[in-house]
């Protein structure tokens, strides 16, 4: 037997002192001490009915409640079970995993596979590495499949530090900790929709123990990649990106890595795993017995129901009942800023904007609502590097690229900021390409044929129509290129997981972003 919260036993001292003091007052005010015995007999009062027993019951009930709060727990008995080793899942979280050719999406189907494998009981512990253009440990080796599922729910391809497809970084990250994971067979499950054939030469699994499985996620017909908040789809210049699944590439990857190719949704089988070992667990989990002590405590309090404790029943219902969504989202002790943050996380942008006065949150809320001018103005009120970086992103969405460069420069002036450096280079390259194309345009007055897709107004002069059509075509090209630039610049977000991944990337940035963004 052990206590989960032993420090709460300190409450026994003030409780016993208070109980003794109230008992002393009750004894001094007992009817038998204040009224003559003859009068008490006429009032049908018996001396044995003085509330001595009730006070002792109250004291014992209080002790039981405090002990229950301290969390008496019982450890599980030592047990032995069979294990086939540990499992590390290498999960692709590139932009193409947001495609919805699989219902509800590729990433959601991959999440379900990870949870099923972790909860199968065949593996001792499970870890997950996520990657796009950088690789990160989402969860170290753990036996808790439910906690792993909560971490998986937070994944979003658009929240990764950099967009791309670099599976070799995930395998390298695993290799760095290979020696620390020794002692049990280590199996690998690679979930991806693109094995990046040009990167396979950089993946080495020769010295790894256990099995390697590759599970393709997606369909050969593929599908477009939807942007967050229903803002359209990822485009490459003037064409929509369609993420297809290349079966031949997966077969080559399986052969190159000596891996087994599985169908999506395949469940692990013990027949696949030759190595197994006995795992002993002693006291691995504790069972809290405190709630069981509350029942006798409530029974001991029954004699006091006529002395005012009955009015505590509604309070008990409020404290122990199921909270409403509003209560769960915004506890009563939260201040205005905490309530604003809770409202933002629950999607109530209007309420959050009404509650907060913090410039960084106001900027985030305005950005999420598509009000980029307000977002840029809010972030300009702070002199932090992240706020200048976010202001630069908002200015890019407004098309104010020169001002965005200045904002990125301000972020870089405050210290090293790989994200600002990366975005600044994108904007600078875009402006340089735009200026080069403008300088190389012919100055002759010859007119190019009008594209058939452009609408011609028969009442408009031919010369004016040609100039407007050329301007419209040029504007469409510029808009398409700007859209492509925006697709390469990740929007600012407040997800705690994304903040951790961004921080890890800043500590160890990747120079080569890869050939594609998806």
Image (cartoon, rainbow, N blue to C red):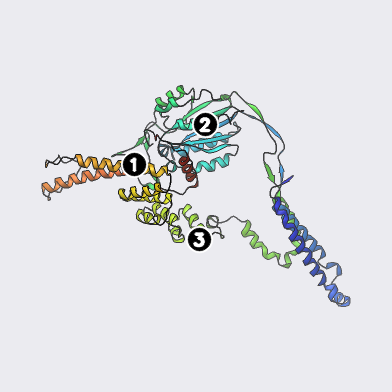
What element does badge 2 sit on? helix
Query: Which of label 3 and label 2 is nearer to you?
Result: 2
Instruction: Give the x, y percent position of residue 386.
Output: 43, 49
Which of 74/455 is in front? 74
Using the image, tell me which numbered label, if any, was put on residue 59.
none
Q: Is residue 294 visible?
A: no
Using the image, tell me which numbered label, if any, was put on residue 336.
3
The quadrant where residue 487 appears: top left
Instruction: Give the x, y percent position of residue 95.
Output: 40, 38
Q: Are marks 1 and 2 in contact (CB under 8 Å)?
A: no
- Who comes first in sequence, dot 3 or dot 2? 2
In the picture of the structure, the residue carrying the numbered disc 1 is 426
What element does badge 3 sit on? helix
Above or below, comparing residue 56 to residue 163 in the picture: below
Could you classify mark 3 by the number of other residues whose Cα lies within 10 Å: few (under 14), some (14-19), or many (20 or more)?
some
Instruction: Give the x, y percent position of residue 303.
Output: 76, 63
Question: CA separation, marks 1 and 3?
Answer: 38 Å
Could you classify mark 1 by the number of other residues whose Cα lies within 10 Å: few (under 14), some (14-19), or many (20 or more)?
some
What element does badge 1 sit on? helix
Question: CA separation, marks 1 and 2?
Answer: 31 Å
Q: Is residue 360 visible?
A: yes
For the point 31% across and 40% down, the residue is: 429
Question: CA separation, marks 3 and 2?
Answer: 43 Å
Tell me the quarter of the image containing the C terminus.
Answer: top left
In the picture of the structure, the residue carrying the numbered disc 2 is 174
The quadrant where residue 123 appears: top right
Above or below, comparing residue 172 to residue 423 in the picture: above
């Amino acid at each position: 037997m052990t206590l989960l919260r032993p420090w709460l036993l300190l409450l026994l001292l003030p409780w016993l002192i208070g109980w003794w003091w109230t008992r002393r007052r009750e004894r001094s005010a007992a009817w038998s001490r204040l009224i003559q015995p003859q009068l008490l007999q006429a009032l049908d009062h018996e001396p044995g009915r003085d509330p001595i027993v009730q006070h002792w019951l109250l004291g014992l009930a209080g002790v039981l409640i405090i002990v229950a709060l301290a969390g008496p727990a019982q450890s599980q008995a030592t047990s032995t079970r069979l294990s086939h080793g540990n499992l590390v899942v290498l999960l692709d979280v590139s932009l193409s995993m947001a495609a919805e050719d699989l219902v509800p999406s590729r990433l959601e189907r991959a999440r379900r596979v990870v949870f099923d494998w972790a909860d199968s009981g065949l593996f001792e512990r499970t870890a997950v590495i996520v990657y796009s253009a950088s690789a990160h440990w989402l969860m170290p080796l753990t036996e808790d499949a439910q906690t792993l599922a909560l971490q998986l729910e937070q994944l979003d391809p658009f929240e990764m530090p950099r967009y791309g497809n670099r599976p070799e970084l995930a395998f390298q990250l695993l290799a760095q900790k290979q020696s620390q994971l020794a002692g049990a067979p280590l199996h690998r499950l690679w979930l991806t929709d693109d094995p990046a054939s040009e990167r396979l030469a950089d993946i080495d699994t020769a010295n790894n123990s256990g099995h390697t499985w590759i599970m393709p996620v997606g369909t050969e017909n593929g599908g477009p990649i939807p942007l967050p908040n229903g803002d359209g789809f990822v485009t490459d210049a003037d064409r929509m990106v369609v993420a297809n699944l290349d079966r031949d590439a997966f077969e080559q990857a399986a052969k190159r890595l000596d891996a087994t190719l599985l169908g999506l949704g395949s469940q692990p089988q013990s027949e696949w795993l030759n190595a197994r070992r006995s795992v002993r667990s002693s006291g691995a989990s504790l069972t809290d017995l405190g709630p069981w002590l509350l029942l006798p405590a409530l029974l001991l309090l029954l004699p006091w129901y006529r002395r005012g404790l009955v009015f505590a029943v509604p309070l008990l219902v409020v404290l122990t009942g199921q909270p409403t969504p509003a209560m769960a989202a915004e506890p009563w002790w939260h201040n205005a800023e905490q309530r604003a943050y809770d409202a933002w996380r629950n999607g109530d942008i209007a309420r959050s904007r009404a509650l907060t006065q913090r410039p960084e949150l106001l900027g985030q809320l305005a950005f999420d609502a598509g009000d980029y001018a307000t977002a840029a103005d809010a972030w300009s009120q702070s002199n932090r590097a992240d706020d200048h970086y976010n202001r630069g992103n908002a200015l890019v969405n407004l098309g104010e690229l020169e001002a965005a460069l200045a904002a990125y420069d301000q972020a870089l002036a405050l210290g090293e900021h790989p994200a600002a450096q990366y975005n600044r280079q994108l904007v600078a390259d875009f402006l340089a390409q735009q200026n080069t194309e403008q300088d190389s345009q012919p100055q002759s007055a010859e007119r190019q044929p009008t594209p058939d897709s452009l609408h011609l107004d028969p009442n408009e002069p031919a010369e004016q129509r040609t100039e407007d059509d050329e301007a419209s075509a040029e504007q469409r090209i510029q808009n398409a290129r700007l859209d492509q630039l925006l697709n390469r610049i990740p929007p600012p977000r407040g997800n705690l997981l994304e903040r951790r991944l961004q921080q890890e990337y800043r500590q160890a940035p990747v120079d080569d972003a890869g050939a594609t963004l998806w």
